[in-house]
């Protein structure tokens, strides 16, 4: 089972329901994968809504990229020997730039809600080990994102 915590560090009024609804769909669609990673434990995910400045700093520090980005994920299951741990575990953190989401939604002529959902799902997929370094990986990630959205 996954549990979500949402922290809004922006001044934007964004409904938590946007993320809670898509999180439920994510957990339902990827139930088998989540269960295989967590077993009978509860996994915790933090979503942090932030601005370009904060996400830019994370992007520079952890990815050596001197620019803002839309979403950054830190997947702790991939870097820890979690299988030996007992009890509940932290799956990862997703940092989402609301500033970038607003710009991208405007550029795509989409609703902000839809853009936030896409970015959140993208970040969540990274937490479960999905990536897009190759065309095959990207296609797999997009397939799951479409099922969830």
Image (spheres, rainbow, N blue to C red):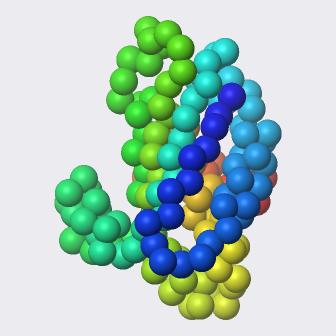
In the image, residue 48 sits, relative to residue 75, either above or below, namely below
Residue 56 in which image quadrant: bottom left
* Vertical comparison of 46 with 11: above or below: above
Q: Position of residue 90 (x, y in %)?
A: 48, 31
Q: Give the residue displayed 60% in from the left and 76% down from the top.
A: 13
Give 21 or 129, whichever is nearer the viewer: 21
Quadrant holding the N terminus:
top right
Residue 4 horizontal side relative to residue 101, left or right: right
- Position in image of residue 45 (x %, y %): 54, 41
Left or right: residue 46 versus residue 59 is: right
* Residue in the picture at 24% in, 53% down: 62
Left or right relative to 38: residue 147: right
| Relative to 10, residue 127 above or below | above
Asked if one can make out residue 118 in the rendered structure from this viewpoint, the answer is yes
Where residue 31 appears, as percent x and y from the top left, is 74, 32
How many marks can you see?
0
Residue at 70 percent of width and 83 percent of height: 111
Q: Which residue is at a point 29% across and 62% down the rendered structure image?
A: 59
Viewer can see residue 136? no
Q: Is residue 94 above or below residue 101?
A: above
Image quadrant containing the C terminus: bottom right
Quarter of the image for residue 104 reads: bottom right
């Amino acid at each position: 089972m996954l549990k979500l915590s949402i922290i809004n560090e922006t001044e934007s009024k964004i409904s938590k329901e946007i993320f809670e609804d898509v999180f439920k769909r994510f957990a339902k669609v990827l139930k088998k994968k989540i269960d295989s990673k967590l077993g009978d434990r509860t996994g915790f995910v933090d979503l942090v809504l932030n601005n370009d400045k904060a996400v830019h700093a994370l992007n520079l520090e952890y990815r050596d990229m001197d620019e803002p980005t839309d979403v950054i994920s830190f997947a702790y299951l991939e870097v820890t020997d979690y299988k030996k741990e007992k009890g509940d575990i932290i799956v990862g953190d997703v940092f989402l730039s609301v500033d970038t989401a607003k710009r991208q939604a405007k550029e795509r002529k989409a609703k902000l809600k839809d853009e936030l959902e896409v970015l959140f799902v993208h970040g969540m997929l990274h937490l479960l080990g999905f990536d897009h370094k190759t065309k095959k990986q990207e296609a797999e990630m997009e397939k799951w994102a479409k099922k969830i959205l």
